[in-house]
C-alpha cells in the first residue's frame, strides 16, 4: 500500500483528484481501508459519549419507577415540568456551541461537555426537593446542548493536512458526505441501546435494598464522568491532528474528499477559516435547513416521549415495577439493530428521505397497535414498531442536512439550528403522557401518530425539492453563479449535487 500512497505526491487539488482516481483504479478498496482507520479511532468514543448522554438524560424515567415521584412529593404535572426545563438551555446553546467548537478544539471541547453533565448527573442524586431537581435538570441541559450538533460537525470537521510550497492551505474532513449516515448510525444507535442498558442497570440497582432512586443517578453519573476524562486523552481534534493517519494517507484522503465536495469547499482550512456572517446567511437561506428541521421536529415528538415514558407506558399494561424495567430492554434493542441496518443501506443507496418515510410508516403501525388494541401483548408489540421506526429517522435526517450544506461555518450553523429547532419538540413530547390519561394514554398516542403523518408530508416535500434543484443544475440553469466569487458559493455551486 505504501507504493500506492507515494503515487499521490502532487499537491495541486485538481491534479490530486486525477491521481486519486488513478489510485482507486489500481486499488478500489484503498479509500475504505483509510475510512476504517477513522472508524476504529473515532466512532467508539462517540458511541460511548452518546450512550452516556442518553442514559443520563432519560434515567429520570427509571428513577420515577423506583420512587422519585414519592420521595420528592411530585404531584400533577410537576414531573413533566422537570422534564421540559432540561430543553430550555439545551436548545439555546446549540448554535453558539457549534460556532466555538473549533476554537476550543473538538478533542477537548466534547469531553469537557461529557465531564460537566456527568458531574451534574451524579450530584442530582443528592436532590431532596422539587426545586433542586429543576435546577439540576437545567444544568444537565446546558452541558448536553452542544453535544449532538457538535458531534455531527466534528465528523465533518475540516483540518490542516498539509501546506504546499506556495503556502496554499488545503482542507479535509473525516468522512465523505455520502458515507456519513452509516457513521452517524454507528454512534446514534447508542440512543436506543441506552434504553436497554439503562433498564438493565436500573433493574440491578433496584435489587440493592439500601437507598432509593438516588443510586441510579450516583452510579450512572459517575460512569459518565470517568468516561469523559478518558476521552480527553484519545480523541483527535480533526484529521490534521489524527496521529493514526500517516502524511501520505492524509494527502490521499484530501484528494478523495476534494472530489466529493464538487467545488463546494472553500480553499481554506477550518483552523484558518474565520467566522463570516455570509456563511450564516447562506445556512438560513437553504430550503434544506427548514425542511429537515421541521421534519425532525415532528419525529422527535414521538422519539422523546417514547424515551422518557416507555417505562410508564409498559407499567400501565399491568406489569410490576421490576418487570417493567426489564421489558424496556427488548424494544430498545430492536431499535438498536434497525438503526445499524438502515444507516448502512442509506449510504449504499445514497438516500436519506426514503429511509425517513419507511421509519415514520413503521412507527405509525406501532401507535395504531397501541391505540386499537386492548390486549397488553399487542400493545407491548406496538412499542417495538414505534422504537424501530422513530430511532432510524434521526441519523437519516442529520446525515441529510450535513451532506447538503457546505463549507464548515454553513454546516456548523445549519446543524446547530436544526438540533435547536427540532428539540423544541420536547415541549410537546414531555406533556403527551399525563397521569390523568392513564392507563390507555389515548391522547399521547394520538399526538405522536399525527406528528409522524406530518413528518412524512414534510420529508416528501424535501425529496421533491432536492430532485427539482438537481435537475436544474444538470441542465446548466445554475451556471450563472460561476460568474462571481466561486470560493463563496458553498453548496450553491452548480456542480454540487444534493442528496435525496
Image (tube, rainbow, N blue to C red):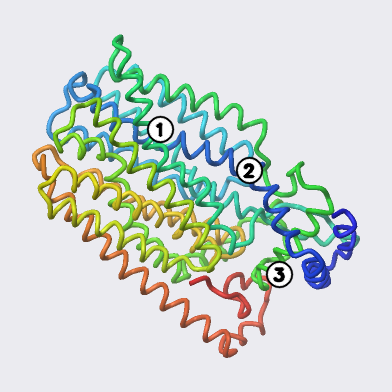
Whether residue 19 is situated above or below residue 476 in the rendered picture: above
Whether the residues at callouts 1 and 3 have beta carbons within 8 Å, the answer is no
Q: What residue lies at 56% left-to-right and 33% top-to-bottom?
A: 112
Identify the element where label 1 is drawn: helix
Question: In which quadrant will I find the N terminus?
Answer: bottom right
Number of the front mark, 2 or 1: 1
**Horizontal side of residue 257 vs 430, given as left or right:** right
Provide the secondary structure element on which disc 2 rests.
Answer: helix
Mark 2 in CB contact with mark 1 (< 8 angstroms): no
Judged from the image, the secondary structure of the residue bearing numbered disc 3 is: helix
Query: Residue 277's quadrant in the figure?
Result: bottom right
Residue 142 x/y as whole percent: 42, 37
- Could you say which is closer to the camera, residue 466 or residue 388? 388
Residue density around tag 2, few if under 14, some if 14–19, many if 20 or more, within 10 Å: some
Q: Position of residue 71 (x, y in %)?
A: 20, 18
Q: Earlier in the sequence, mark 1 or mark 3?
A: 1
Labels 2 and 3: the sequence-earlier one? 2
Residue plotted at (18% across, 44% down): 377
* C-alpha span from label 1 to label 3: 41 Å
Residue indicated by mark 3: 259
Q: Residue at x 53, y 81 (%)?
A: 470
Q: CA distance from mark 2 to mark 3?
A: 23 Å
For label 1, the residue is 197
Q: Nearer the viewer, residue 367 or 263?
A: 367
Read off the residue under disc 2.
42
Q: Residues within 10 Å of mark 3 (few under 14, many from 20)?
A: some
Residue 176 percent across, percent down from the top left:
64, 61
Amino acid at each position: 500500500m505504501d507504493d500506492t500512497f507515494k503515487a499521490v505526491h502532487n499537491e495541486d487539488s485538481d491534479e490530486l483528484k486525477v491521481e486519486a482516481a488513478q489510485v482507486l483504479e489500481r486499488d478500489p478498496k484503498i479509500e475504505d481501508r483509510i475510512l476504517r482507520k477513522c472508524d476504529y479511532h473515532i466512532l467508539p468514543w462517540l458511541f460511548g459519549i452518546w450512550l452516556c448522554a442518553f442514559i443520563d438524560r432519560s434515567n429520570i424515567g427509571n428513577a420515577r419507577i423506583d420512587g422519585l415521584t414519592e420521595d420528592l412529593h411530585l404531584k400533577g404535572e410537576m414531573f413533566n415540568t422537570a422534564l421540559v426545563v432540561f430543553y430550555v438551555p439545551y436548545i439555546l446553546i446549540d448554535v453558539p456551541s457549534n460556532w466555538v467548537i473549533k476554537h476550543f478544539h473538538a478533542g477537548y471541547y466534547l469531553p469537557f461537555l461529557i465531564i460537566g453533565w456527568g458531574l451534574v448527573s451524579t450530584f442530582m442524586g443528592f436532590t431532596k426537593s422539587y426545586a433542586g431537581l429543576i435546577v439540576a435538570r437545567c444544568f444537565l441541559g446546558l452541558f448536553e446542548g452542544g453535544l449532538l450538533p457538535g458531534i455531527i460537525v466534528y465528523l465533518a470537521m475540516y483540518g490542516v493536512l498539509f501546506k504546499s510550497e506556495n503556502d496554499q492551505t488545503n482542507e479535509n474532513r473525516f468522512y465523505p458526505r455520502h458515507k456519513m449516515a452509516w457513521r452517524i448510525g454507528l454512534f446514534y444507535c447508542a440512543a436506543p441501546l441506552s434504553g436497554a442498558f439503562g433498564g438493565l442497570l436500573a433493574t440491578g440497582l433496584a435489587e440493592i435494598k439500601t437507598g432509593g432512586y438516588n443510586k441510579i443517578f450516583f452510579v450512572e453519573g459517575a460512569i459518565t464522568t470517568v468516561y469523559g476524562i478518558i476521552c480527553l486523552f484519545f480523541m483527535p481534534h480533526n484529521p490534521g491532528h489524527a496521529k493514526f493517519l500517516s502524511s501520505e494517507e492524509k494527502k490521499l484522503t484530501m484528494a478523495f474528499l476534494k472530489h466529493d465536495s464538487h467545488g463546494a469547499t472553500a480553499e481554506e482550512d477550518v483552523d484558518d477559516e474565520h467566522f463570516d456572517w455570509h456563511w450564516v446567511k447562506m445556512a438560513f437561506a437553504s430550503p434544506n435547513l427548514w425542511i429537515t428541521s421541521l421534519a425532525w421536529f415532528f419525529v422527535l415528538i414521538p422519539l422523546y416521549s417514547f424515551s422518557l415514558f416507555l417505562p410508564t407506558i409498559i407499567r400501565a399494561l399491568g406489569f410490576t415495577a421490576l418487570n417493567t424495567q426489564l421489558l424496556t430492554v427488548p424494544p430498545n434493542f430492536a431499535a438498536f439493530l434497525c438503526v445499524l441496518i438502515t444507516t448502512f443501506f442509506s449510504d449504499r443507496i445514497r438516500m436519506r428521505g426514503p429511509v425517513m418515510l419507511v421509519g415514520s410508516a413503521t412507527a405509525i403501525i406501532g401507535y395504531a397497535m397501541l391505540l386499537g388494541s386492548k390486549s397488553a401483548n399487542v400493545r407491548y408489540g406496538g412499542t417495538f414498531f414505534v422504537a424501530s421506526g422513530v430511532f432510524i429517522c434521526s441519523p437519516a435526517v442529520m446525515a441529510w442536512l450535513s451532506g447538503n450544506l457546505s463549507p464548515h461555518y454553513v454546516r456548523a450553523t445549519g446543524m446547530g439550528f436544526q438540533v435547536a429547532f427540532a428539540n423544541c419538540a420536547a415541549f410537546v413530547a414531555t406533556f403527551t403522557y399525563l397521569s390523568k390519561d392513564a392507563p390507555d394514554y389515548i391522547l399521547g398516542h394520538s399526538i405522536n401518530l399525527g406528528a409522524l403523518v406530518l413528518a412524512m408530508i414534510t420529508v416528501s416535500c424535501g425529496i421533491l425539492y432536492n430532485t427539482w434543484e438537481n435537475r436544474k443544475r444538470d441542465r446548466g440553469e445554475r451556471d450563472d453563479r460561476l460568474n462571481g466569487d466561486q470560493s463563496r458559493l458553498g453548496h450553491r455551486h452548480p456542480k454540487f449535487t444534493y442528496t435525496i
